[in-house]
Image (spheres, helix red, strand yellow):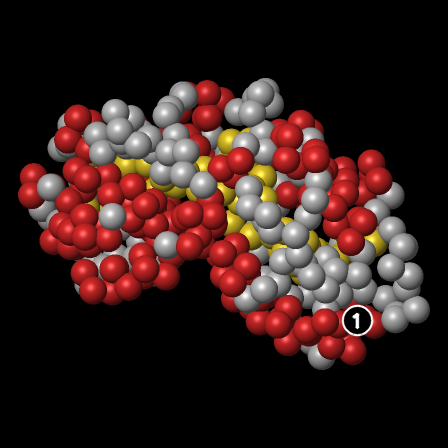
């Protein structure tokens, strides 16, 4: 059940959206606040209900709106689970003290240690890669993120805003791997190489490279995979003009980020909440993430059937813990601001 994301009073939310206060905490209900806006997730939720009999009441909105709502609702919040994309966004919720620790041997055994914290968990991964114009840039010229700051790419780099969580998390990984000084030097070098001021989303960056507006750009892999799987002639033609590089294969590995979530402290249906989190690491749920939204499973060994991911191939991933990415996000923003990466 998907609910209207418009602001409601606490009373209206509790009674209109999730039933009366007489509802028992043991009733088979899960109240989910989600900042994932992918239609393919519908099957994911429907299957959970089919397997468990637990009805999902869902509110979808932007991360900031949902976090503000949870804060305003306080201890009386009906929300059981908060789900979003990017470690930086999950860190924000964690800093607000919204998550409750979850003890689950299943989650611990299924998820690698670097893809979980004590309070929130990763359920899918995506990589931040470099796309380049085949007719003007050689792949060896962009073999690493460091290359984006090299003088040879002056006037050739396109990117979305430095304040976007995708770029903040990348910067967080650079801080963790190289230190603050080198991270700032990198940011200043990238700014000096801008083909234009940062704007648009990741798909816009890919299109700008294909159009010759810039030579290289950063993007998350699921945007690339989505275009690769498109039936539209213009998308097929676009992808013929761009190549994809897995950065840092000889050093730290390509930066990966995640989609994840956790149980809220105020959750009225804690048993259902844990069941839902554990369901998300099942092979079936993991396949939904991969095949439906072009993400990689967070659980190793899950076989998926996604031709775009197969075409992209395997790569060496940066093993940084998602918690380390999260804790550097505030410093990442300060560095971008100092460097003029708006």
Q: Residue at x 11, y 41 (%)?
A: 150
Question: Is residue 127 toward the left or the right of residue 265 in the image?
Answer: left
Coordinates of residue 126 in the picture (x, y in percent)? 45, 37
> Which residue lies under the disc numbered 1?
14
Q: Residue furthest left?
A: 151
Q: Residue at x 24, y 43 (%)?
A: 178
> Mark 1 Cα within 10 Å, few/some/many (few <14, many 20+)?
some
Q: Residue at x 83, y 72 (%)?
A: 15
Coordinates of residue 113 in the picture (x, y in percent)? 53, 35
Q: Residue at x 30, y 32 (%)?
A: 252
Using the image as rendered, state which of residue 169 and residue 178 is in the foreground: 178
Coordinates of residue 87 in the picture (x, y in percent)? 47, 50
Identify whether 145 is placed above or below 93.
above
Identify whether 339 is placed above or below 304.
below
Using the image as rendered, state which of residue 96 and residue 235 is in the foreground: 96
Q: For residue 21, say whether it is visible.
A: yes
Give residue 312's quadrant in the image.
Answer: top left
Coordinates of residue 172 in the picture (x, y in percent)? 34, 50
């Amino acid at each position: 059940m998907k609910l209207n994301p418009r602001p409601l009073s606490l009373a209206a939310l509790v009674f209109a959206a999730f039933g009366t206060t007489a509802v028992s905490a043991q009733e088979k209900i899960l109240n989910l606040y989600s900042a994932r806006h992918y239609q393919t997730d519908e099957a994911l939720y429907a299957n959970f209900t089919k397997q468990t009999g637990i009805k999902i009441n869902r509110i979808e909105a932007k991360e900031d709106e949902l976090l503000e709502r949870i804060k305003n609702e306080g201890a009386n919040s009906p929300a059981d689970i908060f789900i979003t994309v990017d470690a930086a966004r999950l860190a924000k919720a964690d800093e607000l003290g919204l998550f409750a620790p979850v003890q689950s041997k299943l989650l611990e055994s299924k998820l690698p240690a670097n893809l979980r914290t004590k309070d929130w968990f990763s359920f899918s991964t995506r990589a931040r890669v470099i796309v380049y114009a085949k007719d003007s840039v050689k792949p060896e010229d962009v073999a690493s993120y460091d290359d984006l700051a090299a003088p040879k790419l002056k006037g050739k780099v396109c990117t979305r805003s430095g304040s976007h969580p995708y770029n903040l998390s990348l910067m967080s990984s650079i801080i963790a791997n190289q230190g603050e000084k080198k991270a700032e030097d990198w940011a200043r070098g990238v700014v000096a190489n801008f083909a234009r001021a940062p704007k648009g989303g990741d798909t816009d960056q890919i299109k700008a490279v294909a159009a010759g507006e810039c030579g290289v750009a950063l993007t998350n892999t699921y945007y690339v995979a989505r275009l690769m799987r498109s039936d539209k002639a213009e998308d097929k033609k676009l992808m013929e003009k761009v190549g994809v590089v897995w950065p840092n294969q000889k050093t730290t590995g390509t930066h990966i980020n995640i989609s994840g979530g956790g149980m809220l402290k105020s959750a009225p249906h804690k048993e259902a909440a844990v069941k839902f989190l554990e369901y998300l690491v099942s092979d079936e749920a993991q396949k939904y993430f991969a095949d439906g939204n072009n993400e990689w499973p967070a659980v190793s060994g899950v076989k998926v059937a996604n031709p775009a991911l197969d075409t992209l191939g395997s790569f060496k991933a940066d093993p940084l813990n998602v918690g380390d990415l999260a804790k550097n996000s505030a410093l990442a923003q300060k560095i971008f601001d100092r460097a003029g990466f708006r």
